[in-house]
């Protein structure tokens, strides 16, 4: 496909919003950039803040846990040498128990497996911490089961769980109290907005959240004009997200299903955490999870593709795979470059402007498959576009395609240079289909969600028919389905199915 000329026009928002007294950012500022694109771009900053919070939380908890375990081992060593208790301690907890790096690692792994480093208030739950210690201690002690017997091993296991479990719960509670106090002075606080009309049942929870020292409350998006911190109506969520750049959106009042879905999609695009009072279980396509945050029980609403930890794992896989792919396929790329130069005059590579992660525009690389001057011929060939939609410009037997280009397109070899885009972080191996920036002004609200993930070299659209899919809404639906059900296993499945899809050459033009 050739690069399309830009036809986008910058939109000026028609609505403005009121500003709560405690918000320093004015929502009445009019910007020439569409709010939806601004919200996408602010999503990168929001995601970075979430990621840094996760790193700080895990690092701090690891420091506490390692310190407590080290102190417990040092204390046990002293008790083993202290004459009044040495005989009992050496029998109950000899030097092999909690000794060596393997036992140390086992406890940390157990805590990790039981979710003792999770987001929200989950890391501070006593039962979760004790279960983690129990799992880790069992992992550390089971190797000595044959030598010591079931009874003695069980006694030692219970002793370790009681000792370490009590110490870790106590010191994590101390950390919680100290951390809550420090948040008020040093931050970083979490920027939160409320959406919806609150019910009486929500009032106490909302008061607790607004007064929390861990958050900066930005105000309300509600139709009720008499509430404190009124920002505007829920329909103005895009404006609020782009101007205030919140970290978290809390849906705490009744919203119509379509309005609720719009708020969720907008907040997801902006990479916000989304919480809701548990009354919307059947209204969304994802599976909500219960979580405790700010001391209040919520239902967290999120898509699996947009969590910081998953994005980090996905990015690491992209870097490794694209590096190995470029190295292994370099002879093939060299042969293709030579064939292109022999077949027609012009450069080997062709680049197109596409919209990527966070609404950023990047240049997507391809091997050139058309003759020089193909861009200027597009207007004269527009009547042959079989989709009838400029966002999907498809021509059967396009006369601009060269002989080598036709072969490259049928085999999807023209996409190989996009491995450089993957390595640079502009694309992913698997993801939504990348589209042109000039099409953004035609997007409706539900189209923007697909732009909140890195575009992919392949995806569900690739294995479901490629160019045979001529309906833009069908492409969007496939991208949405990928985002709704994302997992590493799904990525591997799509990569595996891409190979036979290419060999079938279905929908390749």
Image (spheres, rainbow, N blue to C red):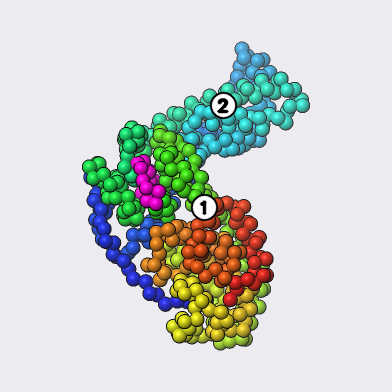
Query: What is the x, y in percent for residue 307?
Result: 49, 49
Query: What is the x, y in percent for residue 425?
Result: 51, 61
Identify which residue, 70 or 22, lies in the foreground. 22
Position above or below: 342 against 25: below
Q: Could you say which quadrant of the image residue 111 lies in?
A: top right
Asked whether, in this view, residue 76 is left or right of residue 30, the answer is right
Residue 392 appears in view = yes
Crowd band around label 1 with a 10 angstrom C-alpha radius: few (<14), some (14–19), many (20+): some
Sequence-first disc among 1 and 2: 2
Q: CA distance from mark 1 to mark 2?
A: 40 Å
Residue at 45% x, 85% y is: 380
Residue at 57% x, 61% y is: 460
Identify which residue, 451 or 422, lies in the foreground. 451
Indicate yes or no whether the magenta region holds residue 485: no
Residue bearing mark 1: 484
Query: What is the x, y in percent for residue 396?
Result: 56, 79
Residue 194 appears in view = no
Position above or below: 249 against 393: above
Q: Could you say which quadrant of the image residue 8 lies in?
A: bottom left
Residue at 73% x, 27% y is: 145
Q: Could you say which quadrant of the image residue 229 lies in?
A: top left
Total numbered labels: 2
SS at mark 1 in the image: helix
Q: Nearer the viewer, mark 1 or mark 2?
A: 1
In the rendered image, the residue lying farthest to the top is 84
Crowd band around label 2 with a 10 angstrom C-alpha radius: few (<14), some (14–19), many (20+): many
Residue bearing mark 2: 164
**Which segment did they paint magenta?**
246-259
């Amino acid at each position: 496909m050739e690069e399309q000329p830009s036809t986008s026009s910058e939109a000026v928002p028609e609505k403005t919003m009121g500003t709560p007294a405690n918000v320093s950012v004015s929502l009445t500022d009019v910007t020439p950039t569409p709010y939806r694109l601004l919200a996408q771009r602010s999503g990168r900053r929001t995601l970075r803040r979430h990621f840094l919070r996760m790193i700080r939380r895990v690092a701090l908890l690891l420091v506490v846990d390692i310190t407590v375990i080290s102190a417990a081992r040092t204390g046990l060593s002293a008790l083993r040498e202290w004459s009044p208790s040495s005989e009992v301690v050496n029998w109950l907890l000899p030097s092999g128990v909690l000794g060596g790096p393997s036992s140390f690692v086992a406890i940390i792994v157990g805590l990790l497996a039981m979710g003792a480093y999770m987001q929200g208030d989950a890391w501070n739950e006593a039962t979760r911490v004790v279960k983690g210690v129990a799992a880790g201690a069992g992992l550390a002690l089971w190797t000595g089961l044959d030598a010591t017997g079931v009874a003695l091993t069980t006694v030692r296991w219970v002793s370790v769980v009681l000792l370490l479990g009590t110490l870790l719960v106590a010191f994590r509670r101390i950390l919680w109290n100290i951390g809550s106090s420090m948040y008020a002075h040093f931050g970083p606080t979490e920027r939160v907005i409320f959406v919806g009309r609150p019910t009486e049942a929500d009032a106490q929870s909302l008061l607790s959240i607004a007064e929390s020292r861990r958050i900066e409350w930005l105000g309300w998006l509600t139709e009720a004009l008499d509430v404190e911190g009124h920002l505007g109506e829920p329909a103005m969520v895009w404006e609020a997200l782009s101007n205030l750049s919140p970290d978290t959106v809390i849906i705490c009042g009744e919203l119509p299903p379509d309005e609720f879905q719009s708020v969720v999609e907008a907040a997801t695009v902006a990479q916000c955490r989304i919480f809701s009072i548990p009354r919307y279980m059947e209204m969304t396509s994802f599976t909500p999870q219960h979580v405790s945050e700010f001391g209040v029980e919520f239902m967290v609403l999120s898509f699996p593709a947009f969590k910081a930890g998953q994005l980090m794992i996905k990015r690491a896989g992209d870097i490794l795979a694209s590096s190995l792919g470029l190295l292994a396929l370099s002879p093939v790329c060299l042969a293709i470059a030579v064939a292109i130069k022999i077949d027609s005059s012009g450069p080997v590579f062709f680049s197109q402007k596409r919209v990527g992660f966070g609404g950023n525009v990047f240049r997507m690389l391809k091997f050139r498959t058309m003759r020089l001057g193909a861009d200027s011929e597009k207007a004269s060939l527009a009547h042959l576009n079989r989709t009838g939609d400029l966002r999907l410009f498809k021509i059967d037997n396009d006369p601009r395609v060269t002989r080598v280009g036709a072969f490259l397109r049928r085999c999807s070899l023209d996409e190989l240079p996009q491995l450089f885009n993957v390595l640079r972080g502009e694309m992913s191996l698997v993801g939504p289909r990348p589209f042109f920036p000039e099409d953004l002004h035609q997007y409706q609200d539900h189209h923007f969600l697909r732009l909140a993930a890195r575009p992919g070299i392949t995806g569900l659209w690739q294995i479901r028919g490629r160019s045979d899919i001529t309906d833009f809404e069908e492409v969007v639906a496939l991208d949405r389905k990928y985002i709704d059900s994302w997992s590493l296993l799904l990525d591997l499945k799509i990569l595996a199915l891409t190979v036979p899809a290419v060999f079938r050459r279905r929908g390749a033009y």
